Image: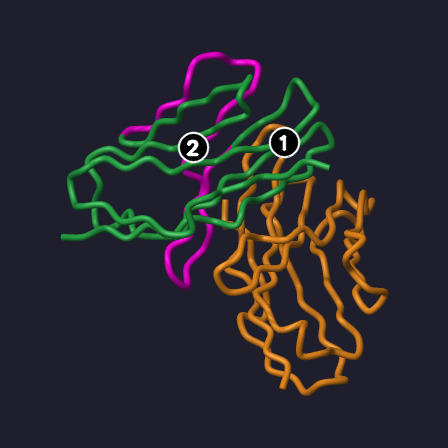
Chain colours: A green, B orange
Amino acid sequence: AQTVTQSQPEMSVQEAETVTLSCTYDTSESDYYLFWYKQPPSRQMILVIRQEAYKQQNATENRFSVNFQKAAKSFSLKISDSQLGDAAMYFCAYENNFNKFYFGSGTKLNVKP
Amino acid sequence: DTGVSQDPRHKITKRGQNVTFRCDPISEHNRLYWYRQTLGQGPEFLTYFQNEAQLEKSRLLSDRFSAERPKGSFSTLEIQRTEQGDSAMYLCASSPLGGSPLHFGNGTRLTVT
């Protein structure tokens, strides 16, 4: 079974600064998908960014980008120009070949004004 | 796209009672997932469907948990003889096909007293 590990339970960043959230995963599959989700307090979980494992190019969505290292099984999320609205729980997720999703334990991001 | 809808939003029940939750996925999505989330943790897989077929049920789930998706539309999750350890947020999500991100509902928060 696949596992997803987020080793940073909580992180803080100053507004307008950059922060990187870490994620590693364990799998024997060669093709899969990786995701970062954001869950604001008491609100719905929403997609931040998606990465296909067969693509070497790192995904980017506005201020959000990933550093995907397939050999190292690492998938970190970089948030540039952090905003107060970025404060939330962030979850890394892995989708396997059977379309089953595995989630990490999450990283709570605090943004300081 | 009206989003994934879950009902009820909150449920308080006494230990030993049965509860049933409903999830209405996005209409064109043929995959539907149930997850359980406790405070400060990532979503834990419960079960998932492709159309009306239940593809997998977590081995962590006891026989008190059952889910259905009649006609491949809405889904219900039933918990029989609830226990205090069942207190959690129950999340439903749907997706149209493999590699697509999950779209989450707002969840049903269950409190067992």
Chain under label 1? A
Residue type, mark 1 in image: Asp
The residues bearing labels 1 and 2 have C-alpha atoms spaced at a distance of: 20 Å
Q: Residue A7 appears at what percent x and percent y? A: 47, 43
| Residue at numbered disc 2 | A49
Query: Disc number at residue B11?
Result: none
Tell me what residue is drawn at x 79 percent, y 65 percent. B65
- Magenta part of the chain: A35-62
Tell me if residue A103 comes above or below residue B69 in the rendering: above
Closer to us: mark 1 or mark 2?
1
B34 on left or right of A87: right
x, y (%) of residue B110?
60, 73
Task: Give left or right: position of A101 versus A50.
Answer: right
Residue at x 68% of width, y 36% of height: A2
Q: Amino acid at mark 2?
A: Ile
Kindly indicate whether the residue at mark 2 contacts the one at mark 1 (C-beta within 8 angstroms): no
Q: Secondary structure at mark 2?
A: strand
Between residue A102 and residue B50, name the one nearer to us: A102
Point 64% across, 19% down: residue: A31
Residue at far right of view: B63
- Where in the figure is residue B66, as x and y percent of width and height? 80, 62
| Residue A53 part of the magenta segment | yes
Q: Tell me which corner region of the image, top left, top right, bottom left or bottom right, holds residue B35.
A: bottom right
Q: At 47% across and 45% down in the image, what residue appears?
A: A91
Q: Which residue is mark 1?
A: A26
Sort mark 2 into few (<14), some (14-19) or many (20+) by Cα contacts within 10 Å.
Answer: many
- Let me know if residue B112 is in the magenta part: no
Residue B77 x, y percent position in the rendering? 73, 63
Q: Earlier in the sequence, mark 1 or mark 2?
A: 1
How dense is the environment of label 1, judged by Cα within 10 Å: few (below 14), some, or many (20 and up)? some
Task: Choose between B44 and B32: the one closer to the eye.
Answer: B44
Secondary structure found at label 1: strand
